[in-house]
Image (cartoon, helix red, strand yellow):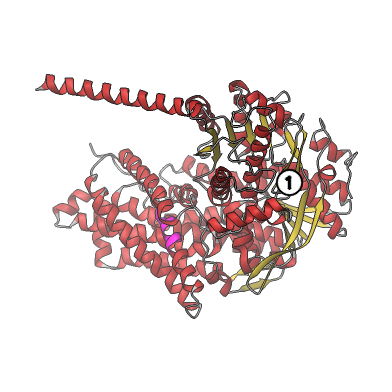
Amino acid sequence: MTSLLAVLIDGSIYASWLFLVAAGLTVIYGVMRILNMAHGSFYAIGAYSAASLVGWYFNNGMGPAWVSYLLLVGAALVAGLIVGVIVERGLLRLMYGRDEILMVIITYALLLILEDGMKIVWGVSPYFAYQPYSELGRTSLGLLKVSNYDVALVGVSALLGLGLWAWLERTNQGKVLRAVIHDREIAVAMGVNVKLMFTITFVLGTTLGALAGALTAPAISVVPGIGIEVIVLAFAVVVIGGLGSIGGAAVGALLVGLSRAAAVHYAPEFELFVIYGVMSLVLAFRPEGLFGRTLARKI
Amino acid sequence: MKNNKSKFSKYLVSGVAALALAAGAAGSASAAENGKFRVGIVTFLSGPAAGPFGVPSANAAKVLVEELNKGNLPAPYDKIGINGAEIEAVIIDEAGGATKQVEEYRNLVQRQKVDAVIGYVSSGDCLAIAPVAEELKTFTIAYDCGTPRLFADNPDAQYMFRTGLDASVDNIGAVRYLAATRPNVTRLAGIQQNYSWGQDSWADFTAAASALLPEAEVVEEQFPKIYQGQYGAEISALSVKRPEIVHSSFWGGDMEALVLQANARGLLEDATGLLTCGEASFATYKDQAPNGMIIGARGPFGQFAPDNELNTWFEGVYQNAYDLEPVYPATKMAQAILGLKYAAENAGVADKEIPSAEQLAAAMKGATFESVSGTVEMARGNGHQAMQGITYGEYHYEDGVASIKNAVSFDGECVTPPEGVAAADWIADGFPGAKCN
C-alpha cells in the first residue's frame, strides 16, 4: 500500500517536472514546426541563472527565504527573454521556411554553441541553490517523506498548464496563434503578423524551458551537460503526447511519470526501458502521438 | 577572372597545406630536441566529470609542474623538473569516449612526441589505452580509473602502470569500515549509476558484506541512469524498505543531487549514507549532508591523505593557487606525477638526460616511492599496480566548518587481493591471506 502511494506521489512529481520541461518544446513545435534541439540549453541556462542569483542572495545574507522563490522565477524570465529574443531574431528568423530536418540540425548546432558558451560564463564547477528546496521542509506520510518543494512543483506545473490552455483557447492572441498553427499561409493572407507571432512563441518557449531549469535548480547540482540529459526525456514526452499539443504533453508526462515510478518501485531493472517502452507502444498504435493531428502534406 | 580565382584557390590550398606541414614538423621536432621532459596529461576538461574530477586534477598537474620546474618540492623530490630537465605539460581533454581517446593518445605520442602520458578517469578509456601504450611503447600512468580489468586483461603489460587503487579496494574497505564501526547492521540498500562502474561496485560491496557482515541482508537496490539528476522515486523506494545503510558509488553532480534530495527527504537521517567517492564533494556539501554520513576517497587521498611533509607542502601550494583544499582526484594526480619523477630519477641515466620508456618502466616496476598519500608500493599487477591502504570516515559540519570524524584506515594487505587473484574470488573465499591490524 505504501508502495502504491509512493508510485502515485513520485509519478505525479516526476510528471509535473517532465511537463515543465516539455511544454516549451511542444509550444515551439506546434506553432513554428521547429524541433528545437537547443531547448535543453535553455533549461540549463535557466538553471545556471537561478542557481547563480539564489546562491548570491544567500551567500550575502540578503534577507528572507521567500524572496529566493521570486528570484528563481525572475532569473528564468529574464534569461528566457534575453536568450529567446537573441536566438529568434539573430538566427532562426534567417532560416524560416527551410526544411524541418535542416532546422533540427541548426538547433543542434545552437545547442553545442550554447553548451560551450555556458562553460565560458559559468565554468565547469557545480552551482547550488538548495535553500529554496530545503526551506519548505517535508511532509511525512507513514514511511514516506515527501519534499514540500516537490509537491509545490506539481501545483506550479498544473497552474502553468491551465494558464497555457487558457491563453490559447480564451484570448484573442491565442486564437490568432491557433490560426497560425492551422494554416500559416491563410493566416498571413488574413493579415496576421506571423513573424511577430513566431517571436512571441519562441520567447515563450525559451522562457518555459528556462523556468523548468530554474525550478529544478534547487534540487540538483547544476553542472555542465544537464540540458542534454533532459532533452531526450522532453522529446519522449512530446512524441507520446503528439508534437505540438499542450494537452498531449501533459498526458505524455503523466504516462511516463507514473510508468517510471511504478518500474522503480516494482521492477527497477526495467526503469531505463520503461520510458521508451511506453513511447514505442504509443507510436505503434498512433504514429502521430496520442493527441497529434494527421496532416495532409502540402506539395 | 574565373581562371584567376581558380589559381588563387590553388595557391591558398597549397599555402595552408605547407603551413600545416610546417607546424606539424615544428611540433614534432620541439619535443624530442628541446631538452624538456614532455608529459601528456589527460583528464576531463569538459562534460559532467570535469567539475568533480578533471578540473581538480588538471589544477594539481599545473601547480605541481610549475613548482617542480622551480625545484620547490621537499626531498626527495627537490631536484628541478624531472631528473633536472624542465617539464613541459600538454594537457588534453578526456571527453569524447574511448575511440577518440585512442586517437588523442596516438597524437600525443606520435605528433607531440611526449616522453610519458599520465591520465584517465574513465575505466573505458584506461582499457582502450592500455594495449595502445604497449603498441607504441610509451610509458603511461593511469592515475584514477578503477577497473580491476586493467591488468587482468593486460597481464603482460610493460609500459602501463597505475598509481591509484582499483575499485574493488573501495568496496572491500567500505565493508571493513562498517564491520569495524557498525558490526550489527542488518539492513543494507544501494543506489548506483547504471553502468559498469556502479554495477561492479555494488557486486563487490554485496559480496564483501556477505563475508564480513553475515547477518546483513540487501533490502533494496536501485540502478538509475547516469546523469539522471532526479532521484525522487528511487529515494521513496529506498525509504520504504527502512535500510540502516545506503551505499552508493555515485560521483559528481549525481552524487551531490542524491545527497541533497535524500537529506531533504529524511532518508539520510533514518539511514546512514555510505559514499565511496564522497570525499570529492567535501567542500560543497556544507549543511546539506547530514553529520555522520560515511565518505571515502578511493584511497588515502584528499581529506584522508596523511600529515606527511609532502602532503602538507602540496596542500599549501594547491590552496594558495586555487583557494581550495585539494580533493582526492587532485591528490591522485599529484601521486602519479611524483611516481613519474621517481621513475625518471631512478632510471640510472645521467643528470638532465631523459630516460627511455623502457628505462622508466624498469625503474617503476615493483618500486616503492614516497608520495603525498604516504608510501606507495607497486606491489600488484606484476609490479605495475599500486597497493595502498584505504580510509573511511564520517562527514561532520559544525559552525560552518566541515571535518572528518571517526576515520578508520585499513592496510593495503587488508583490502587488496593477493597477486594474481581476482577480487571476486578473493572475496568469495573469505579474504584468505588478508593482513588487517
| Direction from residue B356 to residue B180 in the image, left or right | right
Residue sticking out furthest to the front: B351
Mark 1 sits on what residue?
B202
Nearer to me, B356 or B42 = B356
Q: Would you place residue B327 above or below residue B160 in this image?
A: below
Nearer to me, A170 or B68 = B68
Write down the quadrant of residue B430 in the picture. top right
Q: Which quarter of the figure is the C terminus of chain A placed in? A: top left
Q: Is residue A220 magenta?
A: no
x and y, in percent, of residue B123 in the image = 63, 37
Task: Look at the image and tell me whether residue A259 can be seen.
Answer: no
Check the residue under mark 1 and report the chain it is in: B
Q: Which quarter of the figure is the N terminus of chain A placed in? A: bottom right
- Label 1 packing within 10 angstroms: few (<14), some (14-19), many (20+): many
Element type at mark 1: helix
Type of secondary structure dominating the magenta stretch: helix
x and y, in percent, of residue B173 in the image = 79, 49
Circle count:
1
x and y, in percent, of residue B359 in the image = 67, 25
Q: Is residue A42 magenta?
A: yes
Task: Look at the image and tell me whether residue B208 can be seen.
Answer: yes
**Highlighted magenta segment, given as a residue range:** A40-49
